[in-house]
Every structure is written in structure tokens, then in C-alpha cells.
Image (spheres, rainbow, N blue to C red):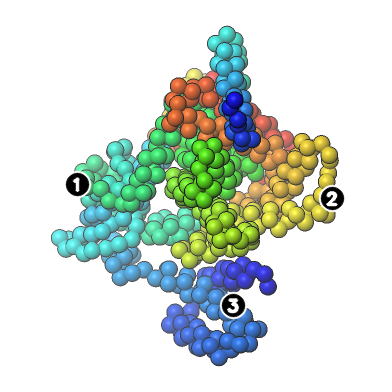
């Protein structure tokens, strides 16, 4: 067996899946696992039994980690609120997310550190989703005191409720009046996160200052992961053509960032070892700048493993790096296994890695001697592999089947690559030589326009998509 | 003599392409305003024209309840066309909240 880590990851995922299906007693499972661990000591020399027991134990670990994650600590804010409570709560804590503007209201995640109810106070932990009906200048890390009712999020909208629970949010608070918010002195939160948010704001400022509304919103989504201003129609037509992945920061963007950083450090004549270290640091910063979503975390971990393989003088293996990325994400939060972003991200990479070489060898490795035709053929095969791997998940969750996806990706992905490169050039020039940004903004805007026109035309083709 | 590595040459080439493309487009926009349509995306790529959209198209969006959809079309038929997006507020069933949502989806021409 060449890739034991991959097998362990599969069993860990299976454990989480089974743990979600069944109800069991945590301590009985722990006792069973410990007994098996004892057996493992006995069968240390028997390879086959050792392997079987290890796999079963990994399965148990998956089950137990999910159960442990779902168990809330006694100080959790959820434990202070009754099922149908109309009491007025006072929460002291800090803002733990970006402030998002949605249909005229503000939304952010609040981390309470103290809860007060009827003049009695307790220390607490957890997260609360706050919705404000008015605009207020708030930032990540601001210390606040909030007064209001706490409620469970939308019991009727189970998908949204499950999504919030996966994020560790069990309660929401609606703020309708300015008097319900009292700003406290000082800042809280992580200074590295604050720095990456500052960097993102600066980059967004360069983009919005040089491009008109529509191209700026698309470029911000493509390179900074800020999707809040994407027009509904653009998003909808990209979902229909199966190209919406270009509006999300993913492995594709992380790869481009690694490439640009490596190239820049190479041009600056930085020795290879330092170059790799600086590239890893840049990738980590980029991961947080874009909001550390599942696809970015996956791609960053894989990128770091690839770069680290130079230090350990080992050949990087894509299956092992993919498994390690999945394992790290699932150990931190086992519920991410049920997140659609996680499933799509891993399924697409796995499909490309597994199917693409096989499809290529099936259809003959060399399609044409003309480079551009060979490139189009290879791109088509990659798109087809990713489509095969993800269409089932998309069909189940979004009820849409898009036969146009392969053709759309062949045309749109190279264009998106050009836009991403010119977008990064625009942002970097904003920091290095701001007088050039205006010049760089024209080609970026033109390429985005071309992308939108092309996508709209593809979405309007007959039999482009079927929605159920 | 300055010696460039292959990577440096590629970066310089890419930046020069961008610079020249920017220069050409900037000049063309100044001299021929019709070129603007090639550089800047038109609003019709990001929003739907409220005066041209058909009942079937608007219903296919599944954004608005069918009752309100027919109210919008009825309003358009009575008044011949929407002169501003604000007029959506006059349609029965569209309050300030729904209007805030719809104003990012439609435009009026």
C-alpha cells in the first residue's frame, strides 16, 4: 500500500458520515476504542490484523470527533437560552467576522465573553449571528455590548439552520435600535487576521478605484473572494454554465499566487530556500485575506506540502497532500464533511487527478502536434473530468444539470486566468506604482466584459442546462 | 549589457502587453466613444431590463412569487412602461424590503 494516509482519511470521513447517521453513547464508543487500542498492542507484529484494527480505530475516531465537536461546553451561550425565550440579554464581547451588508442590513458574527440576564452575569463562549437593521461603522475585533433577544436561527429553513450550525452558530440576535449597541473601549481578535483584512481592504480600494462597478465586483470575487457585490444575473448565468467556480477563490487562484510570488522572489535573486519560505508565508497570508474558505484552505495546505517537499527532499504526491488537507480541515471541524463547498472542492480535484490521466491515455496522449489544439484538448479533458466528479453533487444540491459546462470551461477558464493575472498586476501596481493602475485597468475591464458576454451567450444556447 | 532570465523576460513581456493594450484602449475610448461598449460591460449583462422582460422569463427566475410577477407585468401593460425603477414600489405586493432586493436585479431603459 503506497498511500496509507489516503486510506486513513477515507475511513475517518466514513466515521464522520456514520456518526452523523447513528446515535450512540460517547463513553461506550471510547471504551470500545480503548479496548481495540489494547488489542493493537497485542497484534503489533501481525501486519494484516494491525492494519484492520487501525482502520476501525480511525473510523471510531471520525465518529467520536463529530460527537465531541457537537458537544457544547458548559459555558456556551446556547446553554443560557431557553427554547422559546423572550428575555432581554446583554452580551459583552467582540466582532469575530467581517461586517457584511445584505439587503439593507448588517450581518456579523459576535463572540460573547459575558452574558447578563436580569442583573446577573456569567462568563460565556460561543458565537452569535447578529443582524442590524441600520448602518454603523463597525470593524473586526471591535469590543461591543449588545442588548436584545436571542433566538434560534429559522427553525423552518433547515438547510440554512444546518449551515449555521456547521459554522458553530446556534443563536441569532436582531438589533433594530441604535441604543441596543454600546461600543466598548479597546480591540480584540487576532492581529494577523486584522492585518490580512487591512490588506484586503487596500486591494479592494485599488480595484474599485480603477474599475467600474460590474468589473470591480467580479475582480474582487475572483482574486479576493469578496462576492457580496456580484450582480444576481451574473451569478445565475455562471451557475447555469457551470463556471461559477471562477468567481470563488480556489486552488486555481492559490496556484497563481504561488506562481507570482515564486517568480517575483526569483527576479529579486532571493536564494531558493528563502524563496520557498517567503512563498509559503505569502500563501498563508493570501488564505486569510480571502477569508479562509474550504477550497482555499485545501489549496493552501496542498501548496505548502508541495513547497515543503523540497525541504524534505521527497517527491510530492497529490493524493497524500489532498488527504492531509482533508484530514486537517476535518480534525478542526468534522462537520465540514457535509459542507457543499468542501465536497465540491475535494471532488473536483480528486476527479481531475484520477480521471484526467486515464481519459488521456484512453483517447491517446497526443491529440495534435499543434500546441494550441493540444492545449484546448487537454483543457477539455480536465473540464470533463471535473464535471464528471462534481455533476452528481451539483444535481443533488442545486437541482441543475449543465451539459454546456465542458465547452464553457474550455472557453472561460483561459480567459479567467488572464483576468486573474491582470487583476493581480493591477493590485500589485497599486502598491508599487499607482500611476500605472489606470493603464492596467483597461485590459482587465475589457477581458471581464468579454467573459460576461461569452457566458451570457453560452447560457442562452439551446439545451445548455436543465433545472429541476 | 543587461541579461534577463527567461522568467524575467516573460514577466516583462506580459507587463508590456498589458501596458500597450491599456494605451490603445485608453486612446480609443477618448477618440471613439462607441469603443466604450467593448471595454466597460453594459448594464444589460448584469441586470434584467424591466421593460423588455416577458412574463415567462420573470417567472423562470423564481425570485418573485407568481402573484407579484403578474402584478409587475400588469402594471407595465397599464402604464406602457416603467420610467424609473422606483415605480416598482407602486406595484401591489412590493414593499421596501422586496424593492431593495429587486433594484439590484432589474434596470429600466
Instruction: Nearest to the eye among marks 3 and 1: give it.
Output: 3
Seen from the viewer's position, the closer of residues A190 and A308 is A308
Disc marking residue A364: 2
* Residue extending farthest top: B31
Mark 1 lies on residue: A185
The residues bearing labels 3 and 1 have C-alpha atoms spaced at a distance of: 51 Å
Residue A208 in the image: x percent, y percent? 45, 29
Query: Which is nearer the N-term, disc 2 or disc 3?
Result: 3
Question: A437 or A330: nearer the eye?
Answer: A437
Q: Secondary structure at mark 2?
A: loop
Horizontally, residue A370 falls left or right of residue B83, namely right
Are circles 1 and 2 on residues that touch, CB within 8 Å?
A: no
Q: Quadrant of residue B60?
A: top right
Q: Is residue B54 visible?
A: no
The image quarter containing residue B38 is: top right
* Observer-nearest of B91 and A350: A350
Label 3: few (<14), some or many (≥20) within 10 Å?
some
Residue labelled with disc 3? A55
Tell me residue A105's x, y (percent).
Answer: 36, 40
Residue at point 61%, 39% (across, down): A238
Residue at 60% x, 57% y is A346
Residue extending farthest bottom: A42
Q: What percent of the width, then of the height, locates residue A445?
A: 56, 26
SS label for mark 3: helix
**Taking A114 as reference, is B101 above or below it?**
above
The image shows residue A436, relative to residue A241, as above or below, that is above
Farthest residue, direction front: B1
Q: Are marks 3 and 1 on the same chain?
A: yes
Task: Tell me which chain the residue with mark 1 is part of.
Answer: A
Amino acid at each position: 500500500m503506497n498511500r496509507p494516509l489516503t486510506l486513513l482519511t477515507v475511513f475517518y470521513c466514513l466515521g464522520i458520515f456514520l456518526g452523523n447517521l447513528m446515535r450512540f453513547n460517547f463513553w461506550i464508543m471510547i471504551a470500545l476504542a480503548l479496548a481495540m487500542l489494547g488489542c493493537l498492542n497485542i497484534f503489533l507484529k501481525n501486519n494484516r490484523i494491525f492494519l484492520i484494527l487501525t482502520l476501525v480505530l480511525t473510523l471510531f475516531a471520525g465518529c467520536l470527533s463529530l460527537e465531541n465537536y457537537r458537544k457544547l461546553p458548559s459555558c456556551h451561550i446556547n446553554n443560557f437560552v431557553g427554547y422559546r425565550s423572550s428575555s432581554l440579554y446583554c452580551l459583552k464581547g467582540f466582532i469575530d467576522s467581517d461586517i457584511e451588508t445584505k439587503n439593507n442590513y448588517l450581518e456579523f458574527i459576535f463572540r460573547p465573553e459575558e452574558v447578563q440576564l436580569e442583573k446577573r452575569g456569567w462568563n460565556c463562549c460561543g458565537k452569535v449571528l447578529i443582524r442590524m437593521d441600520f448602518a454603523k461603522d463597525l470593524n473586526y475585533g471591535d469590543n461591543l455590548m449588545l442588548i436584545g433577544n436571542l433566538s434560534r436561527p429559522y427553525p423552518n429553513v433547515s438547510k440554512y439552520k444546518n449551515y449555521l450550525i456547521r459554522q458553530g452558530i446556534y443563536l441569532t440576535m436582531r438589533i433594530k435600535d441604535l441604543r441596543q449597541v454600546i461600543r466598548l473601549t479597546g480591540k480584540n481578535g487576532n492581529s494577523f487576521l486584522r492585518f490580512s483584512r487591512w490588506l484586503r481592504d487596500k486591494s479592494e480600494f485599488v480595484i474599485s478605484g480603477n474599475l467600474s462597478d460590474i468589473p470591480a465586483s467580479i475582480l474582487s470575487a475572483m482574486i479576493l473572494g469578496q462576492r457580496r457585490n456580484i450582480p444576481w444575473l451574473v451569478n445565475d448565468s455562471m451557475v447555469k454554465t457551470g463556471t461559477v467556480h471562477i468567481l470563488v477563490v480556489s486552488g486555481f487562484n492559490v496556484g497563481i499566487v504561488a506562481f507570482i510570488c515564486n517568480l517575483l522572489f526569483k527576479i529579486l535573486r532571493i536564494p531558493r530556500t528563502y524563496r520557498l519560505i517567503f512563498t509559503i508565508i505569502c500563501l498563508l497570508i493570501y488564505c486569510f485575506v480571502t477569508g479562509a474558505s474550504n477550497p482555499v484552505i485545501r489549496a493552501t495546505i496542498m501548496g505548502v506540502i508541495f513547497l515543503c517537499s523540497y525541504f524534505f527532499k521527497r517527491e510530492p504526491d497529490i493524493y497524500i497532500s489532498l488527504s492531509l488537507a482533508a484530514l486537517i480541515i476535518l480534525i478542526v471541524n468534522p462537520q465540514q464533511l457535509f459542507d457543499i463547498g468542501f465536497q465540491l472542492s475535494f471532488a473536483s480535484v480528486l476527479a481531475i487527478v484520477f480521471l484526467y490521466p486515464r481519459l488521456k491515455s484512453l483517447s491517446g496522449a497526443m491529440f495534435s502536434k499543434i500546441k494550441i489544439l493540444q492545449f484546448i484538448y487537454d483543457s477539455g479533458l480536465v473540464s470533463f473530468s471535473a464535471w464528471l466528479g462534481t455533476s452528481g453533487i451539483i444535481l443533488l444540491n442545486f437541482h441543475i444539470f449543465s451539459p454546456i459546462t465542458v465547452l464553457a470551461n474550455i472557453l472561460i477558464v483561459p480567459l479567467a486566468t488572464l483576468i486573474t493575472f491582470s487583476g493581480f498586476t493591477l493590485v500589485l501596481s497599486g502598491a508599487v506604482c499607482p500611476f500605472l493602475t489606470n493603464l492596467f485597468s483597461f485590459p482587465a475591464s475589457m477581458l471581464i466584459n468579454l467573459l460576461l458576454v461569452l457566458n451570457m451567450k453560452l447560457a442562452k444556447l439551446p439545451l445548455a442546462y436543465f433545472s429541476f | 549589457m543587461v541579461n534577463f532570465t527567461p522568467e524575467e523576460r516573460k514577466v516583462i513581456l506580459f507587463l508590456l502587453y498589458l501596458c500597450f493594450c491599456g494605451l490603445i484602449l485608453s486612446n480609443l475610448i477618448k477618440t471613439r466613444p462607441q469603443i466604450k461598449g467593448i471595454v466597460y460591460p453594459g448594464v444589460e449583462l448584469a441586470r434584467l431590463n424591466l421593460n423588455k422582460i416577458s412574463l415567462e422569463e420573470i417567472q423562470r427566475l423564481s425570485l418573485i412569487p407568481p402573484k407579484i410577477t403578474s402584478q409587475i407585468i400588469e402594471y407595465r401593460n397599464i402604464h406602457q412602461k416603467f420610467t424609473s425603477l422606483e415605480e416598482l414600489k407602486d406595484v401591489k405586493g412590493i414593499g421596501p424590503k422586496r424593492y431593495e432586493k429587486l433594484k439590484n436585479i432589474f434596470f429600466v431603459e
